[in-house]
Image (cartoon, rainbow, N blue to C red):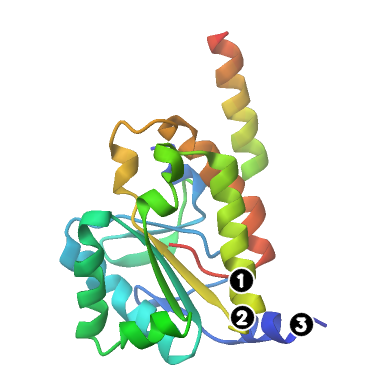
Amino acid sequence: MDILRTHPMVIVGGILQENPFFVPPDEFLRELRGRRDLRR
Amino acid sequence: MGTVREDVAANTDIWLAGSRLQSSRHVCAFFRTSDERYRVLLPFIKEGIERHERAFHIVDPALRQDHLHRLQAVGIDTAAAETGHQLEVRVWEDAYLRGGHFDQDAMLALIQEVLETGTTQGFPLTRLVAQMEWALEDRPGVNDLVEYETRLNYLLPRYGDPVI
């Protein structure tokens, strides 16, 4: 699911659409950093 | 006032999966079968070749010949396109998995180099298509893929080239 959140556009069922699950990179990198900190 | 290349890229409609691509051109594509993949991607690839744009493809090494045959089946002269640097079809080991593992910094540098090479070679646009099934396997470095993909969202808007 994470991979889906890194793409602003998505093709599913042969149809191109804006991806409602997209997370902008600033926010996503913050989230990834947060997860890494939790694991430490 | 943009460069000529930016103007061409901005003003020419790019069709993909039945829609016109807008400014967001980083696309995640899910296909159930190989036939579905090519039904969706071949018109997009062919449109670029006919417009004298560059095509950069990254494919499963086991499917490279099949990929070329699929392109040839819709009338693309792959040998001529490869000779003229219009088409480059690399296998995973020469892109995502160089040195046997995935290195996100090396891959970001490669994508940047590929897109800039297209420009320096005079192509108005590069259409990059990558098969990603290797990411479903337990490959070294694969855990960095999500971070790489999100970092691509800083890089790609600077170029305007579609990346599928």
Q: Specify the subunit that label 2 lies on.
A: B
> Where in the figure is residue B18, as x and y percent of width and height?
35, 77
Residue at label 3? B3
Task: Give the answer, above or below, for where B103 lies relative to A38.
Answer: below
Q: Secondary structure at mark 1?
A: helix
> Where in the figure is residue B27, as x and y percent of width and height?
45, 59
Q: Residue at x 62, y 59 (%)?
A: B112
Q: Are marks 2 and 1 in contact (CB under 8 Å)?
A: yes
Q: Residue at x 33, y 56 (%)?
A: B131
Along the polypeptide, which appears first: circle 3 or circle 1? 3
Residue B117 — which label? 1
Q: Is residue B121 visible?
A: yes
- How dense is the environment of label 3, judged by Cα within 10 Å: few (below 14), some, or many (20 and up)? few
Viewer-proximal residue among B140 and B132:
B140
Residue at label 2? B121
Give the image quarter of residue B74. bottom left
Q: Specify the subunit that label 3 lies on.
A: B
Q: Specify the subunit that label 1 lies on.
A: B
> Where in the figure is residue B107, as x and y percent of width and height?
54, 48
Q: Residue at x 51, y 83 (%)?
A: B53
Tell me which amino acid carries mark 2. Answer: Gln
Looking at the picture, do discs 3 and 2 lie on one chain? Answer: yes
- How dense is the environment of label 2, judged by Cα within 10 Å: few (below 14), some, or many (20 and up)? few
Q: Report the side of B107 relative to B90 (left or right).
A: right
Q: Residue at x 38, y 78 (%)?
A: B44
